[in-house]
Image (tube, rainbow, N blue to C red):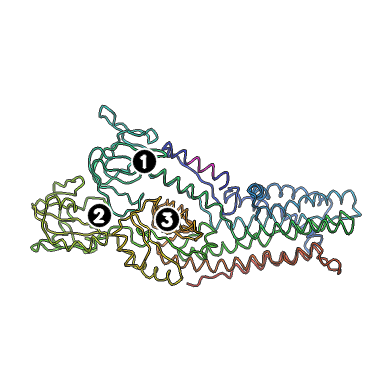
Amino acid sequence: MNHNEEKHMNHQAHQMEGMDHSTMHGDDQMSGMDHGMHMGNFKQKFWFSLVLAIPIIFLSPMMGVDLPFQFTFPGSDWLVLILASILFFYGGEPFLNGAKMELKQKSPAMMTLIAMGISVSYFYSIYAFIMNKLMPQNHVMDFFWELATLIVIMLLGHWIEMNAVSNASDALQKMAELLPDKVKRLNKDGTEEEVSLKQVQENDHLVVRAGDKIPADGVIIKGSTSVDESMVTGESKTVTKNEKDKVIGGAVNGSGTIEILVTGTGETGYLSKVMEMVKKAQTEKSNLESLSDRVAKWLFYIALGAGLLAFIIWWMVDKNISIAFERMVTVFIIACPHALGLAIPLVIARSTSIAAKHGLLLKNRNALEQANDIRYIMLDKTGTLTEGKFTVTGVEMIDPDTTQEEALKVIGALESNANHPLAIGIMNYLTEKKISPYKAENLQSLAGIGLTGVVNGKNVKIVNEKEVEHLAFSFDESMKRQYQEQGNTLSYLIIDKKLVAMIALGDIVKPEAKQFITDLKAQGIVPVMLTGDNKVAAESVAHYLGIDDYHGELLPEDKEKIIQTYTAKGEKVMMVGDGINDAPSLVRATIGVAIGAGTDVAIDSADVVLTDSDPKDILRFLDLAKQTRRKMIQNLWWGAGYNIIAIPLAAGILAPWGILLNPAVGAILMSLSTVIVAANAMTLRIHN
């Protein structure tokens, strides 16, 4: 993690600790870059550097060779010197800073290789300028042309890459936004006052009304309600909460007004702990090294070693330090990664464009490289394999004298004005069935139980299973067993103290999920289901889909620990999820994939986003990753492969036989490899 990013993370953690939800701005980060530049800065640097480079390209020879379009005029050498100096310090600044960071971390890579190329080009050219002014009869070749083209091409490559994988969003900011800015606090005299959330302390008493977000972790000391914790925990059911039950900050209060005793704020709260897990995982994951960086690292060592060796040998043989120095510089210039700098960015740009057309948003370039090694895919159940919303899965009549349509009209009368997930599911079902509900009078909420009212002159109730057990109604309970096994929520209709009907609501499996699991297995990838839902619901869905390995009743830290268990063994793991509870796991996994219909936090934590929320898009991503990696390797060979021949020849390995690489020939080879990698990148295709 770079210094800017670390400062930014620490700043966010501090804000969360004080529950201050002022706006937090994140830097656009590009994988492999350690200086935290904005994409706009790269764009600006590229265009300004291009303006500086154009006159240099027209006025300065290419490795000593005058090109047909070049010309000079009195004083043009001074103009080139001035423009090149501005270009080196302005356009080369991100690469010099990046090299400084890489060397500080004792891991030289692409930034160090570029910095070496532009530094050698610039400072040797300064030496050549001085020598040519002092001793014009002994002309020394300069490399201003190579300096200009290298900086411009490198800036272009990094701008292309940042544009392809840019991510200005911030998962930690989205988590902080789950909590309200203002809360209602109860004073000792029983009066309410509105205070800022950052003023809330442990043991404070807060009032949370229906529909409000719960501002902090706590225990209910007065009232009952139903709480939607799905945004936080991933549990698809609405959870009934009574006195002495715990509630989580960030969850949404349902139908009842409750009073809570605060037990966790700042760094002790549930959300803050999730944020800490995300931050820690991001820090560890940022150390991943890309394929191009590994190639650049070896090329740096080879060029450095070959250049120094050439200097020593030529000086020992000819006793001419100028010739030895020129050979060394020629090796360094030949190793300049013009093509290498474009090899990966052009493939990334092409693959992200193809991905977008297939419903895939790629946010981390490393994901494409690492996807080929994935052996396990961890799948969150709710919202990933299932629809993530309550749907009526069955209506069972208990009273034979009442028709199903009649019962649904009465249920609709009670639920039509409610806004909790169960009510929404029921009303959607009535709309699909084209059933118009009755009108209800004297509608009241029964805290922790359900709803009651008067419909067509009859006293009616819609209650939960616990209330039916309390009232000791007798009925054939076998009808509810299949629904319970599938993890459904059951509600019961009572008319004039008579049990009339049972309605089941559940989170249904996506129609394409089963084939997706089959296709994954066919590729030798093992699916593992992780869910916050109860074990009965988890087992039911896993069995239906053909998933052998599954885990239920998981908290965010449990999911992350499971992934850590696999990664600790050296396994490459993909995590697919859509909730806040999935955020630490999405960051921790080798590749995190977010469902586009999920929460902003999950999307911001992921490396890949499925914009169409179709799990089968994962198969398309794996295929695209395979094709992308193939193109990357091909381009790396074209981008760096010519150095296998050019560097030894430039060093003079065949000089005893009269063969010495002309710098101009090296420049032509360099240009040719750049054209080849660009053309090769454009041939990338996806098979399905």
Which is more toward the observer, 259 or 94?
259
- Which quarter of the picture shows residue 485? bottom left
Distance from Cα at disc 3 to Cα at disc 2: 31 Å
- Which quarter of the picture shows residue 15? top left
Amino acid carrying label 3: it is: Ile
Is residue 380 located in the magenta-colored stretch of the structure? Answer: no
Please state which of the two labelled residues, at mark 3 or mark 1, is closer to the viewer.
3
- Residue 203 vs 455, above or below: the answer is above
Mark found first going from the N terminus, 3 or 1: 1
Which is more toward the observer, 36 or 535?
535
Q: In this view, does 65 lie to the left or right of 389?
A: right
Q: What stretch is highlighted in magenta?
A: 6-12
Q: Residue under circle 2?
A: 422
Q: Position of residue 54 (x, y in %)?
A: 72, 56
Amino acid carrying label 2: it is: Leu
* Circle 2 SS class: helix
Is residue 9 located in the magenta-colored stretch of the structure? Answer: yes
Which secondary structure class fits the magenta region best?
A: helix
Q: Which residue is drawn at 87% across and 53% down?
A: 321
**Image marks 3 and 2: residues in contact by CB distance under 8 Å:** no
Distance from Cα at disc 3 to Cα at disc 1: 32 Å
Q: Is residue 384 left or right of residue 325?
A: left
Q: Residue 562 carries which label?
A: 3
> How many marks do you count on the picture?
3
**Badge 3: how crowded within 10 Å, few (<14), some, or many (20+)?**
some
Q: Residue under circle 1?
A: 180
